[in-house]
């Protein structure tokens, strides 16, 4: 989340993503250097960013993506990436939603958890209906 936040805040330049993630792994996640998890999550989220942002726009039409706080926006992006594109056996949908809500409660504003829950819950219900 830290890396996506920083990348988004600094203008989403493609060439800045790798140095940001590398720096943040070193600073905040020692021991994760040799795992693919962080890279898979960050790169997957960025690769599907356009589709994910369209889904956010559809699920929360009263909140244009660029008006959602950077923290909430990137928590939603990661949560939606996990919900839509990750292996469901590795990351069950309810786990992806709950992890996103906990991140929002910890790092977001007072109503971030409810907002994240509402958006991800709406998308999850649509997936289940299809």
Image (cartoon, helix red, strand yellow):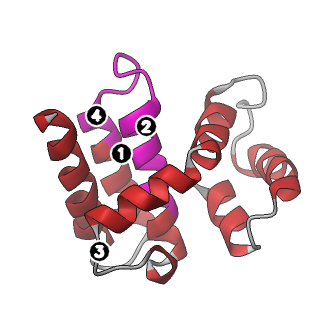
The earlier-in-sequence mark between 1 and 4 is 4
* SS at circle 1: helix
Q: Quadrant of residue 5?
A: bottom right
Mark 1 and mark 2 residues within 8 Å of each other at the beta carbon? yes
Residue found 40% across the figure and 47% down from its top: 80
Task: Find residue 45 and report its horizontal and vertical position in percent.
Answer: 57, 45
Task: Find residue 33 and report its horizontal and vertical position in percent.
Answer: 78, 30
The earlier-in-sequence mark between 3 and 1 is 3
To which residue does mark 4 refer? 93
Quick one: label 2, few (<14), some, or many (20+) residues within 10 Å?
many
* SS at circle 2: helix
The earlier-in-sequence mark between 4 and 3 is 3
Which of the numbered marks, if any, corresponds to residue 82?
2
Between marks 3 and 2 in the image, the one whose residue lies nearer the viewer: 3
Q: Main secondary structure of the magenta part?
A: helix
* SS at circle 4: helix
To which residue does mark 3 refer? 61
Between marks 4 and 3 in the image, the one whose residue lies nearer the viewer: 3
Which of the numbered marks, if any, corresponds to residue 67?
none
Residue found 75% across the figure and 44% down from its top: 25
Q: How far apart are marks 3 and 2 (CA)?
A: 21 Å
To which residue does mark 1 refer? 99
Which residues make up the magenta segment?
A: 74-96
Answer whether residue 92 is magenta in the image. Answer: yes
Q: Is residue 118 left or right of residue 78?
A: left
């Amino acid at each position: 989340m830290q890396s996506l936040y920083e990348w988004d805040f600094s203008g989403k330049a493609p060439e800045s993503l790798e140095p940001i993630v590398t720096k943040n792994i070193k600073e905040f996640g020692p021991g994760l250097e040799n795992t693919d998890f962080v890279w898979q999550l960050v790169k997957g989220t960025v690769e599907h960013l356009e589709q994910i942002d369209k889904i956010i726009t559809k699920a929360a039409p009263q909140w244009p993506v660029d008006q959602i706080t950077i923290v909430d926006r990137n928590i939603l992006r990661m949560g939606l990436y996990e919900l839509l594109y990750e292996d469901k056996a590795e990351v069950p949908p309810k786990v992806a939603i709950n992890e996103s809500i906990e991140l929002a409660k910890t790092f977001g504003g007072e109503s971030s958890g409810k907002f994240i829950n509402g958006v991800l819950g709406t998308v999850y219900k649509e997936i289940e209906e299809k």
